[in-house]
Image (cartoon, coloured by chain):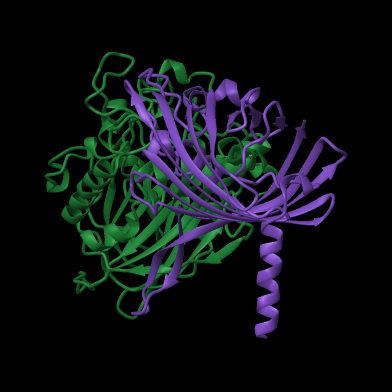
Chain colours: A green, B purple
């Protein structure tokens, strides 16, 4: 029985047919997506004319567990207990911030590595957010690499107020990977949701651009996002992980959280190209202006949003991991503004009065601001 | 109608009482053991050697033996034309195959230097067949995985054929029951229909333990010694697939669905 079954398996890649493809190639330009709802709606109490906005790359609930692609560890899967515990901690911080609109990146709904937990519905049930639109970017039935298995990853927009429409907009794919890898690789999307804020509709965008490309894919994606948001006719807010430094970033290379073993691999950090974001600061309204961001490394450090390593690990300089670059952003449409004193990067316990410790919850810090509608 | 039923029963009985030596193209699915000194070597199906009138050795040599050393003895308890009853006992270890999968279906564990553990998998089975031209067979087998030392591998949650191979080691056990109908249509052609129900140990997180399998195959006699098998096999199993559907209250929700996959089957065997 065993060899015969294995013979079936060998034929698998040649001629497997079934209801579900091996991997989804997302053959569309724009596609409407389902909007999920909390089981019991929580009355939305929003100050007139402004919305608390939060964007967070939640690293599929892996918190500070070192995964194989960062080369500091070799984990591939979370246990169900780890996934639930980490997700509960993420939700605790979201409850503390209590945003009207939350954008999340690297959120998963049915992936083997995050114990098949539906993180979108869990966030809805564990916070005061009522509606959630999930923008799937990676849908592989079984990735035969490192035991990754089933993958259903994407970005999401959550809102206290009704999401009346949501769609995902296809971004260009990488061209510098082989065909087999490309089959199982993720496809970046712009997530767009229309939110009814008391009779007026606003647009919310969530984005997450390429991290490891060497063929200019990230640049094309960044420009597409700029053009898409720039063409929006409603007031809009955009949040996410652009995998790029601000145009005036002082520290641009030699980050101490890149493991030496990653050099020369597909997970080596390519050189940053901060000039890509210049048009965003010129045409849109950032939650932290370049003036506030500062001109020295010491000034800019308080707005860093990313570190591969957490405080429990020592980096290549022998220091405990701490945020070392800014990759996550909030922008709003021209004509709107951000409330003074409410924009921040939640780097550590105490920022904006939070009790949670963001350093322990993800490899990205949440960015928050209060958006004042035009 | 009653006359037709009676005639059909008589026909079946006649088939069932045919003698082995009268059958020009014996069914490979038959529970009976091979005659002493005879040999069957398959590309994918196992090697079968008739050791004695009542004992047969079964093993997969070549490529699979390197990945999973395995051997089984099949013992005949009844060897009549009307009913053949055999039991089997086997032993294998899938560890070399599991280690070959590290980096693909299993993690590499480059930093922690862990590995898939060592397992021995004893398997016992029972099979019964009746008939010669139309052979009806019922088979059942139980395999358990006995771990030796540390093991870092977890259930693969992958495609059913692979899942079944490694289920005893990675999820604890595999129980299979198979019913087969194998009919000689022509002197050189047999058609085979199989239906199996497999149960495997719990996953982590849990998933349905049931795997349903159905196969339809044609066995062709190519001369006196060669057999060619072609067919398709279908699996219905839980691979954590989901669909987004509207629930009864109008909300979008995710619903678990079972996966259905169809694979081609191919085998060539030499029989002496």
Which image quadrant is residue A198 in? Answer: bottom left
In the visual, does B138 lie left or right of A314? right
Which residue is nearer to you in this view: B233 or B15?
Answer: B15
The N terminus of chain A - image quarter: top right
Residue B46 pos. (x, y %): 64, 32
Residue drawn at the location 71% of the way across and 32% of the way down: B40
Residue B152 pos. (x, y %): 36, 27
Q: Is residue B186 visible?
A: yes
Residue drawn at the location 39% of the way across and 57% of the way down: A156
Residue B116 pos. (x, y %): 41, 25
Which image quadrant is residue A122 in? Answer: bottom left
In the visual, does A344 lie left or right of B139? left
Which residue is nearer to you in this view: A249 or A87?
Answer: A87
In the visual, does B212 lie left or right of B181? left
In the rendered image of this protein, does residue B265 appear above or below residue A147?
Answer: below
In the rendered image of this protein, does residue A37 appear above or below residue B237?
Answer: below
The C terminus of chain A - image quarter: bottom left
Residue A352 pos. (x, y %): 16, 47
In the visual, does B119 lie left or right of B259? left
Q: Is residue A219 visible?
A: no
Residue drawn at the location 84% of the way across and 49% of the way down: B188
In the rendered image of this protein, does residue B214 appear above or below residue A5?
Answer: below
Residue drawn at the location 12% of the way across and 47% of the way down: A353
Residue found at the far right of this picture = B223
Which residue is nearer to you in this view: A7 or A70?
Answer: A7
């Amino acid at each position: 029985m065993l060899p015969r079954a294995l013979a079936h398996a060998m034929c698998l890649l040649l001629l497997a047919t079934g209801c579900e493809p091996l991997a989804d190639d997302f053959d569309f330009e724009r596609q409407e997506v389902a909007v999920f709802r909390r089981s019991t709606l929580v009355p939305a109490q929003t100050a007139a004319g402004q919305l608390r906005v939060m964007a967070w790359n939640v690293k599929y609930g892996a918190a500070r567990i070192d995964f194989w692609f960062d080369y500091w560890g070799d984990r591939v899967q979370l246990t169900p207990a780890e996934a639930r515990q980490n997700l509960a901690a993420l939700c605790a911080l979201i409850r503390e911030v209590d945003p009207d609109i939350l954008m999340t990146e690297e959120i998963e709904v049915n992936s083997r590595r995050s114990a098949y937990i539906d993180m979108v519905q869990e966030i809805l049930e564990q916070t005061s957010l009522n509606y959630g639109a999930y923008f799937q970017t990676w849908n592989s039935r079984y990735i035969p690499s490192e035991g990754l298995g089933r993958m259903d990853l994407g970005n999401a927009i959550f809102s206290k107020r009704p999401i009346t429409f949501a769609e995902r907009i296809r971004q260009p794919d990488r061209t510098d990977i082989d065909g087999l890898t490309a089959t199982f690789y993720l496809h970046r999307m712009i997530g767009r949701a229309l939110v009814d804020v008391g009779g007026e509709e606003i647009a919310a965008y969530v984005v997450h651009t390429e991290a490891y490309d060497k063929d200019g894919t990230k640049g094309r994606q960044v420009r597409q996002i700029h053009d898409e948001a720039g063409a929006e006719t409603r007031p809009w807010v955009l949040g996410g992980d652009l995998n790029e430094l601000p145009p005036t970033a002082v520290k641009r290379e030699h980050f101490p959280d890149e493991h030496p073993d990653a050099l020369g691999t597909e997970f080596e950090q390519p050189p940053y190209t901060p000039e890509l974001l210049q048009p965003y600061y010129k045409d849109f309204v950032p939650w932290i202006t370049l003036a506030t961001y500062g001109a020295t490394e010491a000034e800019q450090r308080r707005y860093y949003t990313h570190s591969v390593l957490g405080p429990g690990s020592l980096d290549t300089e022998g220091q405990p991991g701490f945020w070392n670059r800014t990759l996550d952003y909030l922008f709003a449409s021209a004509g709107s503004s951000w409330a003074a004193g409410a924009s921040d990067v939640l780097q550590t316990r105490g920022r904006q009065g939070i009790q949670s410790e963001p350093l322990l919850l993800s490899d990205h810090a949440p960015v928050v601001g209060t958006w004042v509608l035009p | 109608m009653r006359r037709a039923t009676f005639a059909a029963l008589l026909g079946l009985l006649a088939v069932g009482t045919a003698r082995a030596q009268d059958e020009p193209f014996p069914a490979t699915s038959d529970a009976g053991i091979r005659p002493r000194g005879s040999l069957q070597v398959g590309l994918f199906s196992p090697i079968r050697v008739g050791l004695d009138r009542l004992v047969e050795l079964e093993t997969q040599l070549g490529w699979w033996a390197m990945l999973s050393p395995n051997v089984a003895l099949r013992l005949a308890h009844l060897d009549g034309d009307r009913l053949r009853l055999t039991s089997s006992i086997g032993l294998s270890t899938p560890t070399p195959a599991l280690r070959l999968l590290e980096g693909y279906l299993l993690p590499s564990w480059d930093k922690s230097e862990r590995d898939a553990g060592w397992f021995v998998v004893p398997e016992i089975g029972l099979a019964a067949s009746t008939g010669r031209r139309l052979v009806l067979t019922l088979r059942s087998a139980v395999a358990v995985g006995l771990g030796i030392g540390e093991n870092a591998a977890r259930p693969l949650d992958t495609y059913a054929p692979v899942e079944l191979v490694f289920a005893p080691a990675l999820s604890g056990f595999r129980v299979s029951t198979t019913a087969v109908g194998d009919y000689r249509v022509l002197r050189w052609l047999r058609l085979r229909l199989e239906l199996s129900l497999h149960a495997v140990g719990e996953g982590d997180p849990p998933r349905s333990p049931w795997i349903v399998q159905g196969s339809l195959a044609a066995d062709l006699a190519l001369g006196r010694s060669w057999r060619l098998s072609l067919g398709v096999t279908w699996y219905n199993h839980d691979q954590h697939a989901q669909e987004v559907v509207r629930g009864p209250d109008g909300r979008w929700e995710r619903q678990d669905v079972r996966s259905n996959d169809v694979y081609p089957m191919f085998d060539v065997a030499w029989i002496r």
